[in-house]
Image (spheres, rainbow, N blue to C red):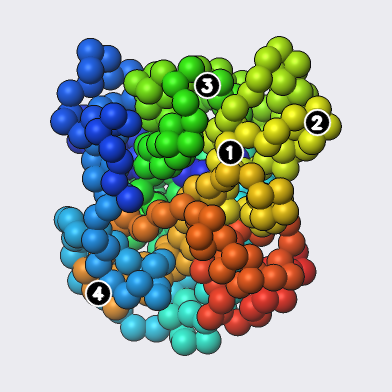
Amino acid sequence: MRRTMRAGALASAAALVVLAGCSTDEISDSGDDGGNQDTEWFVQADFDRQNEQRDATFQGDESEPWLQYLEGDMTDTSEFASEGPKKVCFANASISNPWRQTGWITMQQQLQVLQEQGVISEMETRDAQDSDDTQIADIDYFINEGNCDAFVISPNSTAAMTPAVERACETGKPVVIFDRGVETDCPTTFIHPIGGYAWGIDTANFLVDNLEEGDRVIALRILPGVDVLETRWAAAEKIFEENGIEAEDHFTDADPTKIKQIVTDAINQGQVDGIWMDAGDGAVAAIEAFEDAGVDYPVMTGEDEMSFLRKWEETGLTGLAPVYSNFQWRTPLLAVQKIFAGEEIPTEWVLPQSPITEDDRGEYLAANEGMPDGHYAKFGGEDLPGFPQAWQDR
């Protein structure tokens, strides 16, 4: 996604939008929506599919999760097979938050490797700064320029970007979409972790397992209307309702000051037992609200951002760090490499997405020692040139 932090996933044919097992009292795997109707941001079939994918077996080497994928339809790219370095044109939604900044650094280091191997000659990048209009103009600029051997696009939003992506497809050049999806199946591949429903299932089940019926959860959401964020909350809200958790959601704009005030106000109104976040930006501010109030820490879900992992360890609170795999920023360029080698690639390239638990938190803290607080633990760039300095000197 990531309009702020995260990406959408290609949905089922019915709705081409975004896109450790659970006990039966947490969610239903039957496909029955329990009387609830599908809505703009909740599709039972997509929820069920992503729930199953959480425990699926991924193809490929576990030591290279950015190349793993779920078995499914493959795209024949033999028509693009050709020798010599290629120019990539990258239309990026933005680098306006730490998740995207971490991924951008990883992508730059992967680019360096592929340039040295003679696969890519250059990558011309245009940054839309979170603007649909700007990104549409960026894509059209690349099309009109006519010098792109391949397009890589991280959409700013789903519906608005679809016509521009279709125009890129009409050039006959390969089009690689990653992060959020679009409402067309014309791209050569669409790369993303499992998706927002999986995030919502992981996090809500964790809170349900560690809370009691009737407990109160404050849900901190970045902003409305972003597919993967909306599906995170839609999945979590369903599970909270089914398990008698009293959850109230608030939009924060990822502003730490606003987050702290929302949580402080909630504490003043009564006991807060849990905190749920659709992205970890500002997680520390939420924790500080409990410290300032002098009350017990909540059960909490944040993200694999280093600031949360460090605060989680420091406080000893009961926590979980869901992950929207940042290492996906490597995959688009590696997909380009495969495309120009004429290799088959997944049509929908679903990458692994697994949370960091208390049991493995220490491992990720140690592996990322010296990284800034805004760094993401599962960035997957340890084997790339510039490690660790490139990520430290941001």
Q: Residue at x 42, y 24 (%)?
A: 240
Residue designated by label 2:
294
Q: CA distance from mark 1 to mark 3?
A: 13 Å
Q: Quadrant location of the C terminus?
A: bottom right
Asked if residue 66 shows in the view, the reply is yes
Circles 2 and 1: CB atoms closer than 8 Å: no
Percent x, y of residue 14: 21, 30
Q: For the residue labelled by badge 1, is the local secondary structure a helix, a strand or a loop? A: strand
Mark 2: amino acid: Gly
Give the answer, above or below, for where 258 lies relative to 175. above
**Among the two numbered marks 3 and 2 on one chain, the one whose residue lies closer to the N terminus:** 3
Q: Residue at x 50, y 60 (%)?
A: 359
Within 10 angstroms of label 1, few (less than 14), some, or many (20 or more) residues? many
Mark 4: amino acid: Gly
Residue designated by label 3:
215
Mark 1: amino acid: Met
Q: CA distance from mark 2 to mark 1?
A: 17 Å
Residue designated by label 1:
300
Circles 1 and 3: CB atoms closer than 8 Å: no
Within 10 angstroms of label 4, few (less than 14), some, or many (20 or more) residues? some
> Closer to the observer: label 1 or label 3?
3
Q: CA distance from mark 4 to mark 1?
A: 46 Å
Mark 3: amino acid: Asp
Give the answer, above or below, for where 169 lies relative to 40. below
Q: Residue at x 23, y 17 (%)?
A: 34
**Among the two numbered marks 4 and 3 on one chain, the one whose residue lies closer to the N terminus:** 3
